[in-house]
Image: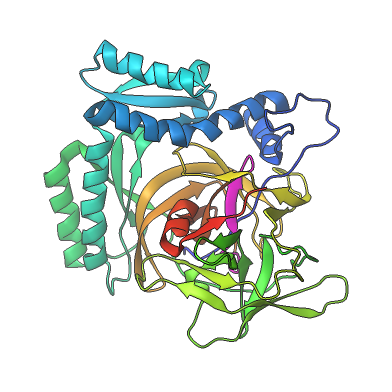
Amino acid sequence: MRWLIAVVVTALVLGLGVPASAAGEVDVAALGLAKDRGISISEAQERLDWQVAAPDLAVTLAARLGSKFGGLWIAPDDGDRIKVGVTTPADQRSIDTALSAADAAGVGSAVDVVVVRHSQAELDAANDWLGEELTRVNTGAASPLRAGIRTNLNLVALDQPIGGTLTASQLDLLAAATIRYRDLVQVGTYTGRSEALASCLFIWCQPPLRAGIQIFSNQKTCTGGFIGQSNFDGTFVQFSAGHCWTFGETPWQTMFPSDGSVHTVGPAFSILSDKDFDVFVIKVNNPAGWSLPSATVRVTASDDTTENLSYVIHSDNLSVVGMRICTTGEKSIFSDCGEVDELGVTDTYDGTTHHHLGIADDICAHPGDSGAPMYANHVAFGVLVAGSGCEIAYESIRTAELKFNVHVLHG
């Protein structure tokens, strides 16, 4: 079963006697990465610094290489190096263009060019077609199909839940996709299915208002995400999962741990009419009382992270397959880190088919974590919305910023 959850992450590793990153500090995600990979914390931080440059490098290469661009991903099994796909036949000019752009981005020594069969444009087109088809065939189905891009495999995955029973329309789509796209689409399986959930746990903070805290309204509990600000009138907002919102509900609230007193964050500020986008924002009442602006996240201690209750977000960006990403929700308590496994995913949960989600594995979250931030290395990446066991789904923070005309606060 997949459910709506949420995420928070990262912190400073202090007093370890290791070199600081370019930002002047070692990220808490480096702690877990070093442990998982069996490397030093300084080497882990270097790999995290590579991934900060990866999303912008992908955008640059898509523009410069055009139809020769076969996607970009990070390879956890090969030293977390950045791989750039160039379609066959791979001419030297395309390879040189990719390496030159990598050098300009400061990650030339971390990039490998790989020859692939399909371009990123082909993957996107197939994924978009499947996304529309899944909206049709998953409606009312007990076992929804899921599709998303696996750049590292140079294919689009079309998966069915293990043990699920498919409808005739779903079976027809599996056959049609195989015929239409051949090896570009791979039919497989996934464990569980999505479900929207809310729950309670005592994860609160004194001001300033920050991401990673428990928020509640009308007996519904979710996780408050990144703090943002309207580009139109400067209103301060807090992101959370769209399925947490219901029409006519009371303002969202949280508690102060010092005395257990209840304090209002504010009412729902905006939710989109396109139901497949699972994010909404809360208007922050009394910004001065909340000591805004605050570009911070509450990060909890775990095997992967070090506690930092005021972890600063420096920027926001798109995701890349294979990149390290972390999470902490109000229910999960302990932060957890994993890798982005799939992007552009179409998945169905809570009776609605959602498009363009990110999927990350080896991250365990629980009901009630819906709405929390996803990030690493002081970069905001998304809003956690769904999950099953130790696999989670999230919406892109960049998409949320554009749709709501707001921006995530940076410190």
Q: Position of residue 163 (x, y in %)?
A: 36, 60
Q: Which residues are magenta?
A: 367-378
Which one is in front, 238 or 376?
A: 238
- Which residue lies at the image location 47% right of the left edge and 17% below the top edge? 103
- Which residue lies at the image location 82% right of the left edge and 36% below the top edge? 14
Q: Does 341 appear above or below 114?
A: below
Residue 388 visible: no
| Quadrant hosting residue 365 | bottom right
Q: Does 213 appear above or below 351?
A: above
Q: Position of residue 292 (x, y in %)?
A: 71, 62
Left or right: residue 167 versus residue 301 is left
Residue 80 visible: yes
* Majority secondary structure of magenta residues: loop
The colouring scheme, among rainbow, by chain, secondary structure or one colour, is rainbow
Q: Position of residue 286 (x, y in %)?
A: 71, 74
Q: Does 33 appear above or below 375?
A: above
- Which residue lies at the image location 50% right of the left edge and 44% below the top edge? 317
Which one is in front, 214 or 230?
A: 230
Left or right: residue 109 versus residue 141 is right
Which one is in front, 98 or 63?
A: 63
